[in-house]
Each structure stands twice: as structure tokens, then as C-alpha cells.
Image (cartoon, rainbow, N blue to C red):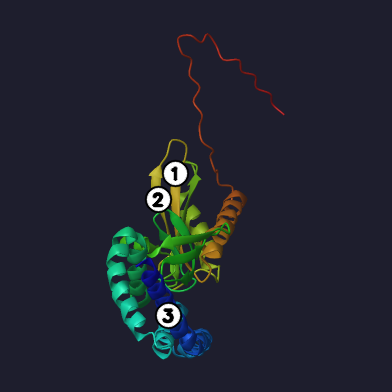
Amino acid sequence: MNQNAADKFIESATAYYQEFIGLLPKIGIGILIVILGSLIAKFISQIYLKRIKRKTTDPLMARFLAQAIKISFILLSFMLALEIAGLSNIAAGVLTAAGGAAIILGFAFQDIGKNFLAGIILAFNRPFHINDTIMVGDFFGKVKALNFRYTHIKSSDGRDIFIPNSDVLTKAVENYTADGFFRNEFIVGIGYEDNIEQAKKIIMDIINSQPEIIQNDLDHQNFVTETELAVNAVNLKVFFWVDTLDYRVSSRIFRGLIIRKVKEALDEKGFNLPANITELKLYKNTKDIPLRLKKD
């Protein structure tokens, strides 16, 4: 009885081995097809990427579609390889298992699936383009890439930030460069004894003399207005519009330049730029405050 079982096992193993040997050439061809299919997929995706880039001004969309084409070709080559290798039953089983696994993995990897679907939606409908400066939640930077699972932005201090696509899709996205305009603002304080209208004229002359500032646009007007009667100064708020092709330059460096020009012009015209007043108090447990003034 044991001998018969051993003989049957040997016969079965031999049959499977011979069948496997017979399939080896087909399996080799299948592996070759997968390798060639991957190379062809890469080549075709690059061609499509160049063509799509020529026909669209949206490089994010072009890159996303090229990735989708590449993955589709690789999957097709894999299924074709199984068919040629005589493993069509395995191919059908893979598809069936993939369907079942998708349900199981959908629960186990909800975030990955959510980010993948969000990436597809963002590829066709999103509030930003390449090199736009955006803020998503607490993250601020320039858009560099849109992938299937995350959006890549570069912060102004050089950090690479990868935001899950689901966050980009569900959270508020602030785009600072969508229409090409950004309004800068700052406050300058002058003394109560100074002439407000004259100060406003000096500031507006500086604003109007800068070619980098948007001029003669009814939708983007530059102006100066009184904003507060502070303890020690009359605060004037300055508003001016700039082009945002480079947000860092227009919102920070150029803003600092205008502040410096305003300060120097007001100084030259004899305006007072009061500092904050500090109040010293004597509390119950303090007898006096040591104070010495020296005149130069």
C-alpha cells in the first residue's frame, strides 16, 4: 500500500516535471515579452509625453497621462506573456484574485486607494499648475509634480514636501499665482504732527515710479489709506499689486525694497517715524526704578 502511494507520487512528480520542461520555452518567451513590453512601454510613454507637451500647456497633465500609458502597457504585456506561456488559466485566476484582493486591500490600504483616486481626479480637475505657488493646510511652496499618490511642492527654504493627493483634494488650496497677480501690503506710521496727505503722496509717487508694480489696471489698484490712530503714530497702510511669475521675489524681496524706499523718502522729507512707546510702572513691591539719562 505504501509502495503504491510512493509510486503514484513519483509518477505525478515526473509528469509535472515533464510538463514544466515542456513549458520552459514558452515561459522564457513570456519573460522576454514582459521585459520587451516594459521597455516598449517606457519608450512609448516618452513619445506620448513629448507629443502631449507640444499640444498642451499643462505639463502636469502630460506627465500624469504618460505614467498611465506606461502602466497600462506593462499590464498588457504581462497578461499577454501569461497567455503565450500557456498559462491563460493563471491569467484568469490572477484577474479573479486581483478583484478579490482589491476588496480586501481596499480596506487594508484605504489611504493608498484614496490618494490614487484623488490623483486621477486632480489630473483632470485641479486648482493649480506647474510652478504655481500654493498653500495646502500648513504647507506652502511651488508645485513641482503631480503623481498618482502625492503632490510634490518645493518650499521657499528648499524643503521637498510630498502632500497626499487626498489632502489636496479635500482641503482648501490657496493659489497665490493662479491669475498672475498678487497684492502686497505693509503699514508705515507717521507722527501726529505730520501732514497725512503729503505722506500719502510721497508713497504713491514711489509706487507709481516702479515698473514692476501693476499700473493703470482698474481691477488691481494701488493706494494708501489711513488704517489706525495708534498710541504714538498715525498708521498708513500701503497696497500695491505685482506680477507673481516668481512669488518669492514679488512678495518678499520686492516688498522689502518698496518699504526701504518709503522709509528713506519720508526721512528725507522730515517726517517722523515714531517708535513704539514703552511704559514703565512702579508696583507695590518696587520702590523706584534706577534711571540715568545722558545727553551727547
> In which image quadrant can residue 74 be found?
bottom left
Dot 3 falls on a residue whose secondary structure is helix
Marking on residue 226: 2
- Do the CB atoms of the residues marked 2 and 1 lie less than 8 Å apart? yes
Give the mark toward the camera: 3 or 1. Answer: 3
Reply above or below: 295 against 192. Answer: above
In this rendering, position of residue 120 left or right of residue 286? left
Q: What whole-number distance in Å separates the C-alpha atoms at marks 2 and 1? A: 7 Å
In the foreground, 97 or 166 = 97
Residue holding disc 1? 234
For disc 1, the neighbor class at 10 Å (few under 14, some 14 to 19, many from 20) is many
Q: Quadrant of the N terminus?
A: bottom left
Residue name at image x 32 percent, y 63 percent? 105
- Chain-order first, disc 3 or disc 1: 3
Q: What whole-number distance in Å separates the C-alpha atoms at marks 3 and 1? A: 94 Å
Reply above or below: 208 against 279. Answer: below
Indicate the position of residue 126 as horizontal and vertical percent values.
35, 72
- Chain-order first, disc 2 or disc 1: 2
Q: Amino acid at mark 1?
A: Val
For disc 3, the neighbor class at 10 Å (few under 14, some 14 to 19, many from 20) is few
Q: Amino acid at mark 2?
A: Glu
Indicate the position of residue 179 as horizontal and vertical percent values.
41, 73
Give the mark toward the camera: 2 or 3. Answer: 3
Q: What whole-number distance in Å separates the C-alpha atoms at marks 2 and 3? A: 91 Å
Marking on residue 16: 3
- Chain-order first, disc 2 or disc 3: 3
> In which image quadrant can residue 255 be found?
bottom right
Reply above or below: 146 against 230. Answer: below
Residue name at image x 47 percent, y 36 percent? 232
Is any part of residue 218 visible from this angle? no
Dot 1 falls on a residue whose secondary structure is strand
